[in-house]
Amino acid sequence: MHSRRVLGVVALGAIVVAAVSFGIVDVSIAGANGCVGANSACSDHDVPPVAISFAALGFLAMLVSILPTVQWIVEAIQAGRTSRHDADIEQAVLARRRTRALAGDDAF
């Protein structure tokens, strides 16, 4: 099992790759249809091969981000529900007993 930090980095990295890919798709389609810097209406006829390949890359990155994202969320919820309070108290009591045993003070 990976750590939560690794899962978060993988998930967020894949989401960033998908966002950049879809941005490239948008810009390349706008450029191919003459929409960049034009004040007139754009034609919606041309879809360049670059747009198709980056759309596929973005879709793949979204698919890759799903599993780590779900695992990251599940582990974060489990870590939030796990109470360390009892374990901390138990460790404090054991440390106190060891200190008393070393000092020879068994009056308590």
Image (cartoon, rainbow, N blue to C red):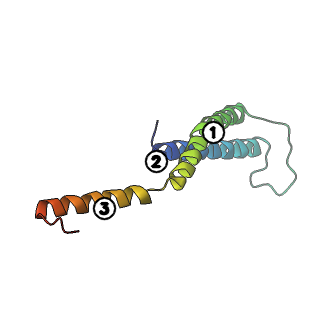
Q: Where residue 66 sits: x, y (%)?
A: 63, 39
Depth check: 15 or 77 in front? 77
Q: State the image coordinates of residue 21 (x, y, percent, origin top left).
A: 64, 41
**Front of the two marks 3 and 2:** 3
Q: Which mark is residue 22?
A: none
Mark 1 — residue? 66
Q: Is residue 60 left or right of residue 5?
A: right
Name the amino acid type tagged 1.
Ile
The amino acid sitting under disc 3 is Ala
Q: In which quarter of the image is the C terminus?
A: bottom left
Looking at the rendered image, the disc whose residue lies closer to the viewer, 3 or 1, is 3
Residue at the image position 79 percent from the left and 46 percent from the top: 34
Q: Residue at x 54, y 54 (%)?
A: 81
Label 1, residues with CA under 10 Å away: few <14, some 14-19, many ≥20: some
Mark 3 packing: few (<14 Cα in 10 Å), some, or many (20+)?
Answer: few
The residue identified by callout 2 is 5
Pointer 2 local density, CA inside 10 Å: few below 14, some 14–19, many at least 20 = few
Which residue does the image show at 19% across and 68% down from the upper left?
Answer: 107
Instruction: Give the residue at mark 3.
Output: 92
Task: Indicate the position of residue 36 as horizontal and vertical percent values.
Answer: 74, 51
Count all numbered tags in the image, as a single digit: 3
For marks 3 and 1 on the same chain, the one whose residue lies earlier in the sequence? 1
Place of residue 84 in the rendered image (x, y in percent of width and height, measured from the top left): 43, 56
Q: Spatial distance from mark 1 to mark 2, Cα to Cα?
A: 16 Å
Q: Nearer the viewer, residue 89 or 13?
A: 89
Residues marked 3 and 2 touching at CB (< 8 Å): no
